[in-house]
Amino acid sequence: MKKIDVCLSPDLIHLYDLSDKNVVVVDILRATSCMVAGLANGVRSITPFADLEACRTMKDLGYLIAGERGGEKVEGFDLGNSPLEYMAAKVKGQKVAVTTTNGTVAIDRSGKAVRVIIGAFLNISAVAEYLKQKKESAVIFCAGWKGTVNLEDSLYAGALVEKLQNDFANGSDAPLLVQSSWQHMKHDLAGFIKNSSHAKRLNRLDIHADIDFCMREDEFDVVPVLSGQELVVNNSQA
Ligand code: MLT
């Protein structure tokens, strides 16, 4: 039987052999929620960069450049890191280059995987169905916060494990851990997330609407996958 595993932080990813697995990168607040919202709303492609200055150079190649550090928009960039910005008319049909504190770092560290898939609550069922159709085992890779574990990515991992439980066996104790947290908290997700460290950080920056939006389940049915250096909507079932 295929296996599902969960990596709770980018600093633990070296412990996982990704070479024969699909990886679902998740950064609920907010990088992967932005990617899903943008690609579902007509953004042509999204190229992730771990390095801020490398991302900045993409402006000269005709890309919109997007990014944050510590949650705040990078000076001189076209977009910050709000899923609502990614759905604006000016982003439709554009190629976006993006750098974020944690999300794009996790994507960067997933390079050895068979496929890199972008997950969020916004597309959770579409990702679950996609993984079920593939023959490979999978790792859910939580972006966390600067190497530490965070609540919202761990809860997403628990929710996805729950959707996969009939098709995948657990690869370690981590799926059990996140699934039982999800079962405990899912009835008041907004209430628990409100107390998470990054929700508090975003609230200090007055970013309330993003948090509510990122908690919505199954708003979109797109499955973004990494193709070469860029994320595109999976159309081909590749
Ligand atoms: C990240 O990649 O660390 C986040 O998306 C930060 C943010 O909420 O802007």
Image (cartoon, rainbow, N blue to C red):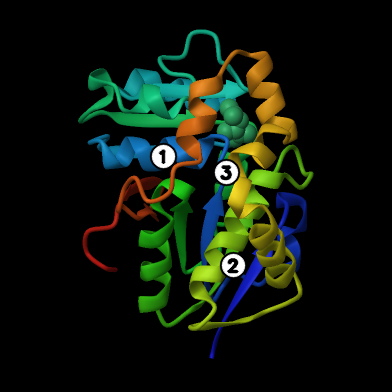
Q: Which residue is mark 1?
A: 35
Q: Secondary structure at mark 2?
A: strand
At 46% from the left and 25% from the top, the residue drawn is 82
Tell me if mark 2 has few (under 14), some (14-19) or many (20+) residues whose alpha carbon lies within 10 angstroms of its own.
Answer: many
Farthest residue toward the bottom? 1
Q: Is residue 153 left or right of residue 220?
A: right
Give x and y (percent) for residue 130.
36, 68
- Amino acid tagged 1: Met
Q: Which residue is mark 2?
A: 139
Q: Is mark 3 within 8 Å of ligand 1?
A: yes
Instruction: Decide: is 62 above or below 164.
Output: above
Instruction: Decide: is 125 above or below 172.
Output: above
In terms of image quadrants, where is residue 175? bottom right
In terms of image quadrants, where is residue 96? top left
Q: Is residue 219 left or right of residue 199?
A: left
Instruction: Decide: is 7 above or below 4.
Output: above
Q: Which residue is mark 3?
A: 27
Give x and y (percent) for residue 219.
34, 45
Image quadrant of ligand 1 equals top right
- Amino acid tagged 2: Val
Q: Secondary structure at mark 3?
A: loop
